Image (tube, rainbow, N blue to C red):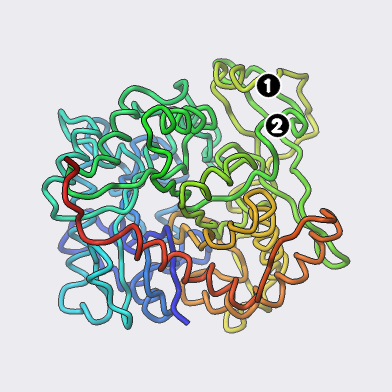
Amino acid sequence: MPYFDLHCHPSMKSFLSNNVSRERPSCWSACNSIVDMLASQSNLTQAHQGKLNIGVAAMITIEQAYSTSFMLQNIVPELSCLDRDMLNRPEGNDGLTYFTEEIRHLQASLHGRSNEARVIKHMGEYNKDGVNLILAIEGAHTIQGAGMTPSASLRALKEKGENRFLYITIVHQTNFITCSHAYSVKMLKGNKQFRPQRFGLQEEGRKLIDVAYDRNSGGHRVFIDLKHMSLVSRKNFYAYRKEKGYENIPIIASHMGLAGMSWNRIDDHIRSAVRDEEYVRVKFDKPKGLENSEWKSEFNPWSVNLYDEEIPLVIASDGLIGLILDRRVLGAKGVAAEYFHPEEFKALGLSLTRDDDGFVEESDFEGEKDGQDTSKPMSRMNAEKDLWHLCNQIVHAVRCGGPKTWEHLCIGSDFDGLISPIKACKNLTEMFVLEQELPKMLPRALQAAAKKFPGFDFKTGNIQDRVEDIMFNNARRFLEKHFQASQPPQV
């Protein structure tokens, strides 16, 4: 069957492989590494071989904060194809230049191979036999030009019409003028630039939402992606949608995990929360997920993930939840401490506690080298464990959002976004493993859920159909409805 991915980076690693544009390898080329997160996961060759029929290609500019990382500057280039100069973004350089250059890099790689892969602007250009790429913007910093705000830049991009974007993530992993972000970079935990420094949704963020949703600008909408917004910013976003009458516009949650708890019960899972200079450092106990005689699962409670109350909001908007294939985010690995802006921590009604010195953080690179037989994906160590965690996420989403949730789930892998991929599906060539193994594992997870939540009707229907919906059909229906040719301006 064909597959869909709501969030991947098919051009990112080849783009970052050389500072000289004419010497860059094409997006069909592989980036080899012994470390899973640094090896190619979604280049165009992998997409084509893996029968990716529709993939949302996220364009992102490396943030300046990464230039100050010893690991990124000295270790990562030695372990991968990534170029030290491309990871060293000079302070003050506008993101729009890099953004435009990456799109050109992708388009140059596609030249003359449109039967195999193409970028489409609407479903009228869809090719059922090849790879159809739809562009998206990850992080509003990516389109901030010299002397231009992100909202002004997005309006110009929409009106120019050269490219069309399915969604925009309005913040990424560092401080930006649109809103506060959720802390999510544990491998660079000593770098304070990755810690939240603002409070909630800012005025520029509201302007960006207005421009994105305005059909009079460019004749179509750009959807807002929840990923990377802090919880306070997301709550502000939901309130702003209601205030402005935007509630019927689909919400995108492009490459998400689930926190496994209510946003009213965060305190129940806090081991310690202490003021660390200008931040609050929080250490969590992981919420428990489904278990049976073979497997146990947990959730990653970081606030970058969706809380229980958010899932029905996405479903009610007719949106999509893309399930990330990062084993850390899915809860299959240890969880590090998270940093909160102190005023946001207070606004969430959370309490400071005593510290717990017994907490041990895990490195992002721990266990990344996989020495198993790569010709048999399900034989790899932890493959079934990771798949069980993915099933735990699916079942939890349905329990929170109701049976209609089955129609709004898809894969948002974040392949090539420097993730630690689940061992059952390490890149786009292995999507078939999910198609084959989920119908076997998901019924076992639903049996465990029936014991844990007696009386709840998950309305599973035909499991094979549910899996095919998640792998492709849900997204195809969404795009047929919401990604058509430009609509006439509203009067």
Amino acid type, callout 2: Ile
- The quadrant of the rendering that contains the C terminus is top left
Query: Can you give x and y, in whole percent of width and height, for residue 426 in the image?
Result: 54, 69
Residue 40 seen in the figure: no
Amino acid type, callout 1: Leu
Residue drawn at (52%, 58%) of the image: 408
CA–CA distance in space, label 1 to label 2: 8 Å
In front of the other: 436 or 191: 436
Quadrant housing residue 441: bottom right
In front of the other: 314 or 416: 314
Quadrant housing residue 425: bottom right
Q: Which mark is residue 266?
A: 2
Residue drawn at (30%, 62%) of the image: 134
Quadrant housing residue 40: bottom left
Marks 1,2: beta carbons within 8 A:
yes
Residue 215, placed above or below residue 420: above
Residue drawn at (82%, 53%) of the image: 453
Q: Which mark is residue 350?
A: 1
Query: Can you give x and y, in whole percent of width and height, for residue 221 in the image?
Result: 27, 47
In front of the other: 327 or 123: 123
**Local crowd size for mark 2, using a 10 Å CA cut-off: few (<14), some (14–19), many (≥20):** many
Q: Is residue 18 left or right of residue 435?
A: left
Query: Can you give x and y, in whole percent of width and height, for residue 148 in the image?
Result: 17, 31
Q: Is residue 250 left or right of residue 189?
A: left
Q: Which mark is residue 459?
A: none
Q: Secondary structure at mark 2?
A: helix
Q: Secondary structure at mark 1?
A: loop
Residue lying furthest front in this view? 491
- Name which of mark 1 and mark 2 comes first in the sequence: 2
Query: Can you give x and y, in whole percent of width and height, for residue 248 in the image?
Result: 41, 44
Residue 169, placed above or below residue 56: above
Residue 20, placed above or below residue 305: below
